[in-house]
Image (cartoon, rainbow, N blue to C red):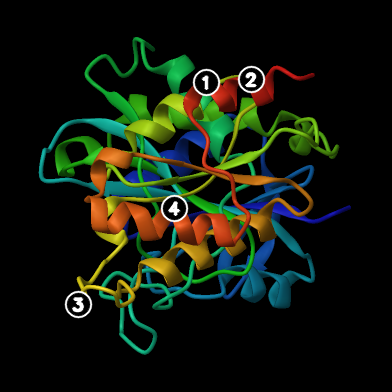
Amino acid sequence: MAGVVLLVACDADEASSVMADALRSRGVFVPYGTAEGAEVLAAGHVRLWCRTGTHLHEDNLDLRYADALGERVHEVLFLSKHVASSERPCLTVHPIGVPHLPEGESPPFGGRAGQSPPPSIRLAAIWRALLAVKDDPRIPEFEVSLEVTHHGPWLNAPSAFLEIGSTSSTWSHAGAGQVWADLLLDLLSEELQGREAPTQPQHHPVVVTLGGGHYAPRANMMAAEQGALLGHMLARHSLPFEPSDEGTDVGGAWRHAINESLASTRRAHPGRTVVVSMDKKSFRGWERAPLLEHLASLDVAVVSAEEHRAMLSMD
């Protein structure tokens, strides 16, 4: 076995609890043991770890689980609530990391400054599954969206947060928890039977997106394509540029954020081509030119939605 898929729930998070309860109610998981004093349920190659506390500052949960139960963790999916000032009901999914923060800084919402864990290998598949259930009668008032890379914790395994938002009035929404449970049981159907999940053809590239807002409109569009693979997504605010005098290099943490996000995405998808899609209108001319030069120096192609679609159609 390559490793287990670890679903992590926590009791101090209302949305996490309602999602875990819905998964338990399906009768798929059976008691398996404990890790750090918390219950672990199992089905095939999938584990449901029902912990105490919250998620954001619990670094190395993949390694801690492996130490407790002797199983390598292949992927971590966190069940969590989503908080937004819009207060709109929504189901979201996103990778984690804070690659734009200066190393040595203490991130307020967890993680390691300047670093990003590998993104979940099935990030785009989760997004397409959310699109398929957006009209489910159990969640009539809910929207669905990707979110860009943000917050902690730090992990070594590919990971993502699966969320119910955006306020206390919807975090415990039973229908939303049930939709997520059914989506996960379908998405992980092979692993739940003790088999390996199928993969996309090796020539399908992984897309990293740059620019735009928090709800990743470019990634929402490109990852919706059948067979698409998605890596990290960096919003414009996570690419800090510092203006410089004419003739000198453009400063800021943007280069590091891009380099870290590309490297982290490659760790999740070894051997695959990683391409970039960027919202060019997000960047001013003095930012856009060095950004494109930097990507060219890394031999990373910048592709349009049409070019990406053509790459997927080469099967």
Residue 187 bears which disc, if any?
none
Which badge, 2 or 4, is on the more N-terminal residue? Answer: 4
Disc 2 marks a residue whose amino acid type is Ala
Task: Choose mark 2 or mark 3, whichever is in front.
Answer: 3
Secondary structure at badge 2 equals helix
What percent of the width, then of the height, locates residue 66? 72, 71
Give the class, few, some or many, for how many residues have Cα within 10 Å of label 4's Cα (few <14, many ≥20): some
Q: CA distance from mark 3 to mark 4?
A: 19 Å
Label 1 or label 4, whichever comes before in sequence order: 4
Q: Give the mark nearer the N terminus: 3 vs 1.
A: 3
Residue marked by disc 3: 245
Label 2 Cα neighbours within 10 Å, binned few <14 / some 14-19 / many ≥20: few
Query: Residue 303 placed where, x, y %?
Result: 53, 35
Q: Residues within 10 Å of mark 1 (few under 14, many from 20)?
A: few
Marks 3/1: CA distance? 37 Å
Question: Nearer the viewer's eye, disc 1 or disc 4?
Answer: 4
Question: Residue 251 in the image: x percent, y percent?
Answer: 30, 75
